[in-house]
Image: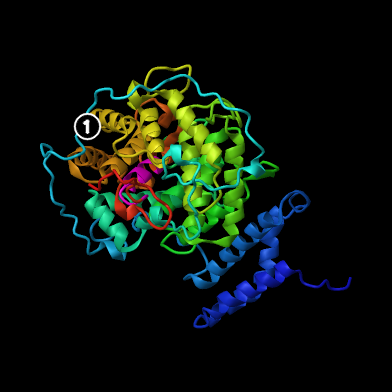
Amino acid sequence: MPAQEPSPKADSSTKLAAAGTAKNRKHESRNRRANGASRALSRLATRRGRRELREQSPSWATSLLLHIAVLLLLAYVTLPLASTPELSLEAAAITEETFEIEDELLDVDFDMEQDTLEETIDEQLDLQPQIEVTTEAFEFQDAPPLEMLTEAVDFGVSLSDLGELPDTAGMTTSGLAGRTGATKAELLRSGGGTRSSEKAVLAGLDWLARHQYPDGSWNFDHTQSECNGQCANPASRYFRARSAATGLALLCYLGAGHTQEEGRYQRVVLRGIYALGNMFKLDENGASFWDPEGRMYSHGIATMAICEAYALTGDPALREPAQAAINFTCYAQDPRGGGWRYAPRQAGDTSVVGWQIGALKSGYLSNLSVPPQVVQRAAGFLNSMSSNDGSRYYYDKNRADGHAACTAIGALCRMYMGASKDYPGVQNAVGYLSQRGPSEGDVYYNYYAAQALFHYTGGKGPIWKQWNDKMRDQLVSTQASEGHELGSWAPIGAGHAAHAGRLFTTAMSVMTLEVYYRMMPIYREAAVEGSFDTSTDDTQEN
């Protein structure tokens, strides 16, 4: 059979492999691996390159997987040794002598000025009702076709100003700029992070790496990985959503500045993104990560991870998949009530809505197209779920008892959408959360409440200090410190975390301890860059 001419994709892969080899000429013994890059790439691509993908998927879907496969091959060429190093218990031990901390943190002065709780600052809150908020459901006309919703929205402007949208050309990912380098070190110090809390984050990331599946994914049933049942508290059979678990784990690494291109966990992240690339389903509505176990939770979490990976690296192979996932989020919104729930276009609940708005916010920070109508409808949904002047939020229309976690979600989403710091709904919700304090077992509530309070206070002052000291020390002290469970957290109580298991509890705890640098404080001037305006003229920096 005559030899076929190499395709443009194969030619491109060969050039990428050759480029990776050229950058590592000092390692001549590894050149033989690069010479076989095209053959290995073909084998990897075959797993996803079946006839169905070729016939139904757009070219970028195949390109994404080929691109990631090449990066995986180059990782084997350019990183020390070909095999992934085993993460031994000794390597992850949390001691001053053996634990490795990122270089930029070694010189951080963690001795912050101690604010007294009696100090009078402008975060003192008036918890009395100040405005009348209707709780009647908002009615919307049927959504226009998705292709018409192409204009990007600025999450930082007032919803009343959505008619005059800013030009997003040149927008940077300034909201994520605190995850690395000197900015991360300063945010960690000034926000109340400690050497112990950052060690807890790294130990948690090590535990997650040890529980990554061979195909690069994670599962809330962590026992089938390297763990082999050594760690207790796997998820119940109803919480074994691979795309949600993989997305959550990736968010932990991305939140600490580790990407598929750099960082201590580069290959862990790269394998995770490759796994996600094999999970989405494509149709005319976009790329869906929906699965029977995690449902729209899975889609929102995985979309958030893909968008953040793109935002932090600018990897062109991720742009179209990220935009396609955002498109499906927009399609799946309830066109009348403005929310999201388990199935696409179903009447919403606040918990699922939180992940979708988080994904849209990450998409916006990635300079992807986010339709303003979607944000407007979501704001209407939040209005319909709020009571007591915005100080409490319901789970859904059938549960009109203010829910703590939903209140934290509602407050954070309001901030994402551009509510000013002196907006009574935000003030009242923050007042409620600060009085309630951190939970001992509800990691879901802690994750959202920590972000809401951090953004409102800028990570400064007595309100934040009182919350943060308790939350931080509680998480550090309850992290597992021995055996194969080292670096993880066990679920406490009989709530959702108990069903979701140890991996879910660990991921949420790690992301809570990353609150200092995960996103730049919304109400600080430093969080604003270019056209991404997250403050208004009447807000004050703490």
494 relative to 182, above or below: above
In x, y percent, where is residue 502? 41, 38
23 relative to 285, above or below: below
Colour convention = rainbow
Would residue 190 be found to the left or right of residue 366 on screen?
Answer: left
In x, y percent, where is residue 250? 47, 50
Would residue 82 be found to the left or right of residue 18 on screen?
Answer: left
Would residue 40 be found to the left or right of residue 443 on screen?
Answer: right
Q: Is residue 241 visible?
A: no
In x, y percent, where is residue 127? 24, 26
Q: Is residue 514 magenta?
A: yes
Q: Quadrant of residue 237?
A: top right
Instruction: Give the amino acid type for the residue marked by disc 1 in the picture.
Output: Leu
Q: Which residue is mark 1?
A: 125
Magenta region: 507-519
Q: Is residue 14 visible?
A: yes
In x, y percent, where is residue 8? 73, 69
